[in-house]
Image: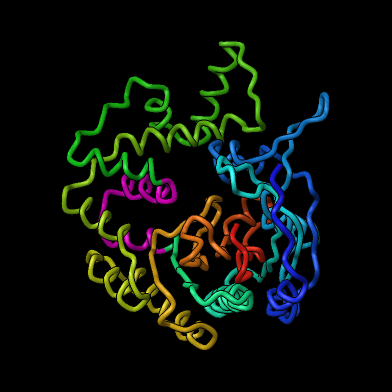
Amino acid sequence: MRVEPPVPEAALAAIRQPLEAAGATRADAPLLQPLNLLLDLAGEAMRARLFVVQAEGGAEACLRPDFTVAIARQHIEAGGGEGRYAYEGTAFRASSGAERPEEFLQVGLELFSPAGEATEAADAEIAGLAWRSAVAGGRSDLTLRLGDVGLFGPFIESLSLADALAARLKRVAGRPRLLQAELARVGEAAPAQGGTLAGILSGLSEAQAGALLEEVWSLAGVEPVGGRGPAEIAARLVRKAEAASAPALTEEQAAAIRAFMAIDDAPDAALARVGELAGRKDQALKAALAAWARRLEALAKVADPHRMSFAPALGHAFDYYDGLTFEVVSDALGADRPVAVGGRYDGLLGRLGGGEGRAVGCMVRPWRAWSEGEA
């Protein structure tokens, strides 16, 4: 395993300082993390980047690839609510690049607050902390790239699409391959679903669909695995059938979505372009854009607006982000080696069994932030 070189203590102390001054409780995370949970959150394609371990007869685990999920689980187990946690430790990700370290240091901060609380101030604080921490490493070629996974939903709603088609597009928004496949079927007729099991289930209530699927299992002698019951599986099949039978995008609608996904400009210009591309039902989108104006006003107090850009489609390896996303990138290192990353992940708390809440966090790679680091 390739290990990242250490950062000089003076430089590391400077990089830590903004996070340490944020009034957070120090947290840690177990070195071993549950593999299935991380794959559920990031997709099976993430497996190739994880170091998987398994004791004889035990469940598969992996060396922790980051701290966010583990700290969120600890926060939920402690009762949820408000919480602010700082961390520092090694993380592990396999790399196909011969020069890339696979064991490396991360420092970061995760911020949790109750459901219903406004997000703009917390978003600006966390992105600002990541920026200040990255800049403290000494590099002069940094850019704060901003995005928002949550903008796609209101933008799609503005286009007045059929409900099933809109729902399908929202589900694949963070999966470029699936979104491109949807854009590629412009003008196609929807396939008939009536003869499929999913098509049959789609005509029933949720309770009836679950009961029918359970009866089919019983007749076939099938024992379900993985913890999902018939009602949940039936609901997924129904959604799949409804999405598959939805009408395809028109050329005009597909062009608007492609243009939205291609936006990458100075924040004010980028957000103005989002508004220009919107359809008539844009009330929710206008509210989201107004919230972004407030975030940018707050961020301008800690980061140079001329060193910021905005791309609504900006995403990360883990697809649990559902609002603000950001990364600090260095011209010398390139976009594929960000100095810092982070974002909002409210929905992750529910997926981990913690109910509703607000969550946003950041992670900084000190070796990359250090002006003499090359990894």
Image mark count: 0
Q: Position of residue 92 (x, y in %)?
A: 69, 48
Magenta residue span: 151-175
Q: Which residue sits furthest bottom?
A: 301
Name the residue at the front extreme: 372
Residue 363: x %, y % from top left: 63, 64
Q: Is residue 312 left or right of residue 224?
A: left
Instruction: Give the residue drawn at x 50%, y 73%.
Output: 142
**Relative to 303, is 107 on the left or the right?**
right
The residue nearer to you, when weighing 373 against 134, is 373
Vertical side of 64 occupied by 196: above or below: above
Does 165 appear in magenta? yes
| 191 horizontally vs 231: left or right | left
Any magenta on residue 363?
Answer: no
Quadrant for the N terminus in the image:
top right
Residue displayed at 31% across by 39% down: 181
Q: Is residue 219 left or right of residue 185?
A: right
- Taking the spot 35% from the left edge, 45% from the top edge, the residue there is 179
Q: Quadrant of the C terminus?
A: bottom right
Q: Nearer the viewer, residue 245 or 6?
A: 6
Which image quadrant is residue 263 in?
A: bottom left
Toward the right, the furthest residue is: 56
x and y percentages locating residue 74 in the rendered image: 77, 57
